[in-house]
């Protein structure tokens, strides 16, 4: 019997089976795509993806020039991120893996658990392959593109056609708030900005069809957002996600769909638990450190960052520079990236149309209410002040005005609804697909033109050698083979973000989540008073009240922009350099002179003391420091501190054998038991071994460490690990295994049910195309 092959009808691009056989699934998909494009003129998923990439190259491609780095006078990239990623890069180059501690600023502090580090965030993978200046711009650009595609997916979850989805993607691509985040160098905030809208997309699908694959998708997106480091937007977003779940459960209850109600609640709870569990190795140590950081002391003024949004800031919904611009200094509050509400005039008008014309559409009311509520939460109102006092965790974050990122998300989603309604009415009048395509295309073109104008207006680059330069003074300091720290006088000598690339270890720095006890030590050293009343982000060295505390920090060199007058006897000028590069946040690139003074009385990184004074807690240690000189004395927590070692002889030795971020190896020799002061910042995550056996460390001099060393020759090795690291890692690994197991079960279940095609991406996009 002759086999008859299927033939393809050319009339409408559809497959027709003449006799026998069956069409290939790929042919069905391609046929559906071709049919939809001919019938509606609407772009497919792949066409939308390609267009977004092309537009991203048009609008932002100039930042990808080889050898260039994003630059603005207000950029956190130069002020912070090059330093944080520089710590990672040098640790990887040395073969030590991911660093848990950083020694480049504030005499040392946690690195891995800082919300700005993002060492294990998947989409910062380029920083494992390229040095930080080469990886920054591509990382920012990739997030801009992915953030746009997230909104395409959100439009699909809202049941919108291809043109509204494409408009949402383009509006997100050129969202002025995202552009300003790039301008401000928000490398750690951009992941949350890019991906939190995807949480709503997946949750909408889970509420419609409570099933395993959507719950797992929600868990995966949640874990990705929590890996983004800065959880502020995720924290805000969780309020609205929880509200939507409660609304969905209430509607199911009223409809009597108790089975669906249980499934939605169960899958939502499971996805949340999996997301938190997979990120536990980051979240648990970070939560455990909250009592140790100054952020725990944050006042209302710190929470407001000493300025807040008023009703007049809402005028920026209509024009981003209506109140001024940081480019020319006309914006009084400087930080327009924090305060602006603008997400595009065309999307704003369409959002209004969506909220009115599409009021009866599913989820439109939720989007409208969320738009208004998020806007109100961003302003300095009694409501926000109430949340500050009553809502757990709310006060740990700064600047509630960042809620406007959620406002722009809801606004762009409503813009997609608005375009859907406008095109439906236009199609009803004209009936021609090309007219609706022309109208949608014209609106998208306006958004692109405006976005490209602002991107070229605000974004700029500088050569990589200026972003992380090799300076004369850094070469001088690198020639010293000893382990030591430097003290730049003020913030206009060495940019804090350049310390790690230069290989410097400073006692000052910039870290939003810094250790409270080190700040108290710093205040005692500079002002003679260790009392802290507020959170701190910048730590500048400007004066000395206690030279003994200064010496104990192992400060060998002091760097100043001008000669010291009068010159303290302990300091000697050893070098001076002219016209050195300098970056000052909020002012930009400058040149400065650098004078280098050697501190002749600096103590080494490890040293013996002749006398030990016991302390019973932090307050007692602070009081004892006020009463004692610490040149040859240590104030030590613990009962063993009652032992007195006696005067140090010339035969006793203590020296550093190896030092790295979070690692210190020391060799000691003494004829009797003696106390060793270790000039590393105390943290309960430090542990020590002596000759391979676990050895106890003592908190010393309020902010440093020490250890009792027995007589003879010994090798002391210190290592740092985040708090609760092993149990938290075990939870994350267990959650990851559970996620993969459930994903495998869901996949096999779908195979048994005969659903072979994926429900997202290309195939789903081709099946659901509509104007």
Image (cartoon, helix red, strand yellow):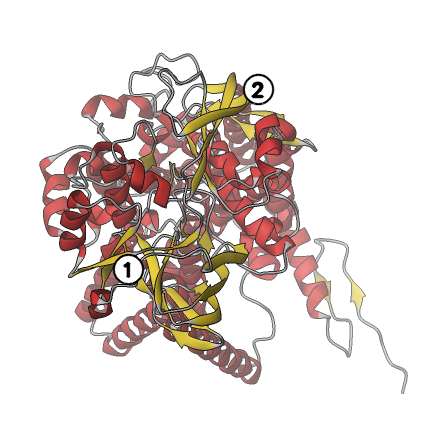
Where does the image place residue 539, in percent across and percent down from the top left? 33, 35
| Residue ID at (27%, 46%) | 630
Q: Is residue 536 visible?
A: yes
Residue at the (22%, 60%) spot, across then down = 247
Give the residue number, with chain letter if any, for mark 2: 577
With respect to residue 540, does 148 lie above or below? below
Q: Mark 1 points at which residue?
A: 699
429 or 676, which is in the foreground? Answer: 676
Number of numbered tags placed on the structure image: 2
Residue 170 x %, y %: 52, 37
Depth check: give the residue in front, 608 or 225.
Answer: 608
Horizontal side of 484 relative to 8 (left or right) equals left
Tell me which numbered mark, 2 or 1, is placed earlier along the sequence.
Answer: 2
State the image quarter where residue 322 is shown: top left
Bin the neighbour count of mark 1 within 10 Å (Cα to Cα): few under 14, some 14-19, many 20 and up. Answer: many
Helix, strand or loop at disc 2? strand
Q: Judge whether residue 428 can be spotted in this image.
A: no
> Do the numbered discs 2 and 1 sit on residues whose CB atoms are within 8 Å?
no
Q: In this view, does 316 lie above or below 418?
A: above
- Seen as rendered, the residue at the extreme bottom is 1
Q: Where does the image place residue 550, in percent across and percent down from the top left?
A: 34, 39
**Residue closer to the observer: 111 or 246:** 111
Specify the label residue 375 is tagged with: none
* Disc 2 residue crowd, few under 14, some 14–19, many 20+, Cα 10 Å: some
In the picture as drawn, the residue positioned furthest to the right comes out as: 2
In what element is the residue under mark 1? Answer: strand
| Residue nearest the observer in this picture, 612 or 73 | 612
Measuring 33% from the left and 27% from the top, which residue is drawn there? Answer: 340
Q: In the rendering, at what x and y percent does residue 126 appear?
A: 61, 49
Q: At 19% from the left edge and 70% from the top edge, which residue is drawn?
A: 253
């Amino acid at each position: 019997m002759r086999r008859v092959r299927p033939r393809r009808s050319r009339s409408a691009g559809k497959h027709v089976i003449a006799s026998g056989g069956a069409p290939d699934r790929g042919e069905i998909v391609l046929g559906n795509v071709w049919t939809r494009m001919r019938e509606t003129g609407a772009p497919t998923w792949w066409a939308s993806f390609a267009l977004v990439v092309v537009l991203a190259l048009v609008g932002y491609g100039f930042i990808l020039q080889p050898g260039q780095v994003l630059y603005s006078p207000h950029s956190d990239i130069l002020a912070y991120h090059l330093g944080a990623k520089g710590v990672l890069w040098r640790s990887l180059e040395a073969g030590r893996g991911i660093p848990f501690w950083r020694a480049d600023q504030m005499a040392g502090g946690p690195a891995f658990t800082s919300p700005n580090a993002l060492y294990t965030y998947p989409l910062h993978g380029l920083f494992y392959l390229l040095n930080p200046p080469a990886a920054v711009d591509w990382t920012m650009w990739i997030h801009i593109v992915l953030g746009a595609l997230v909104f395409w997916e959100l439009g699909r979850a809202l049941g919108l056609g291809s043109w509204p989805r494409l408009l949402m993607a383009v509006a997100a691509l050129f969202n002025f708030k995202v552009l300003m985040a790039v301008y401000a160098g928000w490398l750690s905030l951009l992941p949350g900005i890019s991906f939190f809208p995807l949480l709503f997309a997946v949750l909408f699908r889970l509420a419609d069809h409570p099933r395993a694959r959507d719950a797992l998708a929600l868990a995966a997106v949640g874990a990705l957002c929590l890996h983004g480091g800065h959880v502020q937007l995720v924290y805000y977003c969780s309020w609205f996600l929880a509200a939507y779940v409660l609304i969905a459960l209430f509607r199911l209850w009223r409809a009597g769909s108790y089975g669906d109600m249980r499934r939605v609640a169960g899958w939502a709870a499971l996805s949340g638990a999996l997301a938190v569990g997979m990120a536990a190795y980051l979240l648990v140590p970070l939560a455990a450190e909250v009592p140790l950081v100054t952020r725990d002391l944050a006042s209302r003024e710190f929470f407001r960052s000493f300025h807040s949004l008023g009703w007049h800031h809402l005028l920026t919904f209509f024009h981003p520079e209506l109140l001024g611009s940081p480019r020319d200094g006309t914006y009084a509050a400087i930080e327009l990236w924090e305060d602006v509400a603008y997400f595009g005039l065309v999307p704003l008008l369409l959002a209004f149309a969506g909220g009115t014309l599409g009021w009866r559409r599913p989820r439109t009311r939720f989007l409208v209410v969320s738009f208004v509520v998020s806007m109100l939460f961003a302003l300095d109102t009694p409501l926000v002040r109430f949340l500050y006092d009553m809502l757990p965790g709310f006060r740990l974050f700064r600047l509630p005005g960042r809620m406007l990122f959620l406002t722009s998300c809801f606004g762009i989603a409503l813009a997609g609804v608005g375009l859907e309604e406008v095109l439906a009415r236009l199609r009803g009048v004209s009936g021609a697909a090309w007219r609706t395509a022309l109208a949608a295309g014209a609106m998208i073109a306006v958004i692109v033109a405006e976005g490209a104008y602002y991107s070229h207006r605000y974004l700029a680059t500088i050569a990589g050698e200026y972003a992380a330069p090799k300076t004369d003074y850094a070469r001088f300091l690198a020639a010293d083979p000893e382990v030591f720290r430097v003290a730049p006088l003020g913030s206009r000598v060495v940019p804090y973000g350049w310390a790690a690339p230069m290989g410097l270890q400073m006692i000052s720095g910039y870290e939003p989540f810094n250790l409270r006890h080190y700040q108290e030590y710093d205040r005692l050293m500079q002002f003679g008073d260790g009392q802290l009343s507020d959170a701190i982000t910048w730590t500048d060295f400007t004066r000395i009240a206690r030279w003994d505390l200064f010496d104990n920090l192992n400060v060998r060199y002091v760097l100043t922009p001008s000669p010291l007058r009068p010159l303290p006897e302990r300091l000697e000028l050893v070098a001076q350099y002219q016209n050195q590069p300098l970056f000052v946040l909020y002012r930009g690139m400058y040149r400065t002179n650098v004078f280098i003074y050697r501190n002749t009385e600096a103590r080494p990184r490890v040293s013996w003391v002749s006398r030990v004074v016991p302390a019973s807690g932090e307050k007692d240690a602070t009081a004892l420091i006020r009463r004692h000189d610490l040149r040859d004395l240590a104030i030590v927590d613990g009962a063993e501190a009652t032992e007195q070692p006696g005067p140090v002889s010339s035969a006793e030795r203590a020296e550093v054998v190896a030092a790295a971020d979070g690692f210190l190896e020391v060799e000691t020799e003494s004829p009797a038991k003696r106390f060793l002061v270790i000039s590393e910042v105390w943290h309960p995550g430090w542990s020590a071994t002596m000759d391979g056996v676990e050895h106890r460390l003592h908190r010393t001099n309020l902010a440093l460490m020490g250890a009792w060393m027995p007589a003879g020759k010994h090798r002391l090795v210190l290592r740092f690990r985040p708090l609760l690291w092993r149990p938290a890692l075990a939870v994350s690994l267990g959650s990851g295994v559970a996620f993969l197991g459930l994903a495998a079960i869901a996949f096999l279940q779908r195979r048994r049910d005969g659903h072979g095609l994926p429900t997202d991406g290309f195939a789903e996009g081709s099946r659901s195309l509509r104007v």
